[in-house]
Image: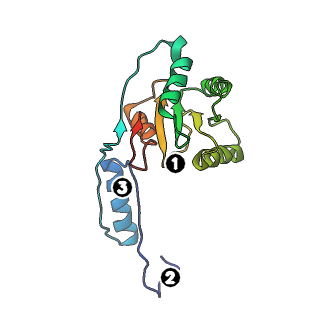
């Protein structure tokens, strides 16, 4: 903005899907106090009626087979993908290896991977050459694959907020998805 003082200011857009009221207040104050800009807010709903939530109880020993069954039930067509969230790097690697053994185009994703490999995995998932990602919460919030049909939490997430963020990866194309 400072660089282009002599020219009209282009429209500025800021977008967030999940900012809490105190974060919105900070953003609003920053723009007003620092930049002298008051902006129009468009606040949407958190409701995603295309997402179908279900708790499927299972014992630890059943997780692999239950995950496999959920994938079979929800990815019967060649379109779409699934994200399976787990709580540890080791868990991601082990469940991914199991699913690969079951014939799924699957990779694991966690913070211990080199940045280039993370990008490759995310891109392959978005393009559809990977159908399934087994991930810790390091899986990028900016990863926007529109046709995620299924999000599985094989382990309980750290908070309800984390759960909602992670489940929100599903159904961004507004088509039905299962969480």
Q: Earlier in the sequence, mark 2 or mark 1?
A: 2
**Circle 1 residues within 10 Å: few <14, some 14–19, many ≥20:** many
Image location of residue 176, percent across then percent down: 39, 41
> Residue tagged by mark 3?
26
Instruction: Kindly identify the residue that appears in the image at 52 percent across and 36 percent down.
Output: 82
Viewer-closest of 111 and 32: 111
Instruction: Kindly identify the residue that appears in the image at 36 percent across and 51 percent down.
Output: 23
Viewer-closest of 109 and 172: 172
Image location of residue 151, percent across then percent down: 47, 34
User: Which residue in the rendered view is the most extreme toward the bottom?
Assistant: 6
Q: CA distance from mark 3 to mark 2?
A: 25 Å
Image location of residue 57, percent across then percent down: 41, 17
Instruction: Kindly identify the residue that appears in the image at 54 percent across and 11 percent down.
Output: 61
33 vs 100, left or right, is left
> Residue tagged by mark 1?
145
Q: CA distance from mark 2 to mark 1?
A: 35 Å
Mark 3 element type:
helix
């Amino acid at each position: 903005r400072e660089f282009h003082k002599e020219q009209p200011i282009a429209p500025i857009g800021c977008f967030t899907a999940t900012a809490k009221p105190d974060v919105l207040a900070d953003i609003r104050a920053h723009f007003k106090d620092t930049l002298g800009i008051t902006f129009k807010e468009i606040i949407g709903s958190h409701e995603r009626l295309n997402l179908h939530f279900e708790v499927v109880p299972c014992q630890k020993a059943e997780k692999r087979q239950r995950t496999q069954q959920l994938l079979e039930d929800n990815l019967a067509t060649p379109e779409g993908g699934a994200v399976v969230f787990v709580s540890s790097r080791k868990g991601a690697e082990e469940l991914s290896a199991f699913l690969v053994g079951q014939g799924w185009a699957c990779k694991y994703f966690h913070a211990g991977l080199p940045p280039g490999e993370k990008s490759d995995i995310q891109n392959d998932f978005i393009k559809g050459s990977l159908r399934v990602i087994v991930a810790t919460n390091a899986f990028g919030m900016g990863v926007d694959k529109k046709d995620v049909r299924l999000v599985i939490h094989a382990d309980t997430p750290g908070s309800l907020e984390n759960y909602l963020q992670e489940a929100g990866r599903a159904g961004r194309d507004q088509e039905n998805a299962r969480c």
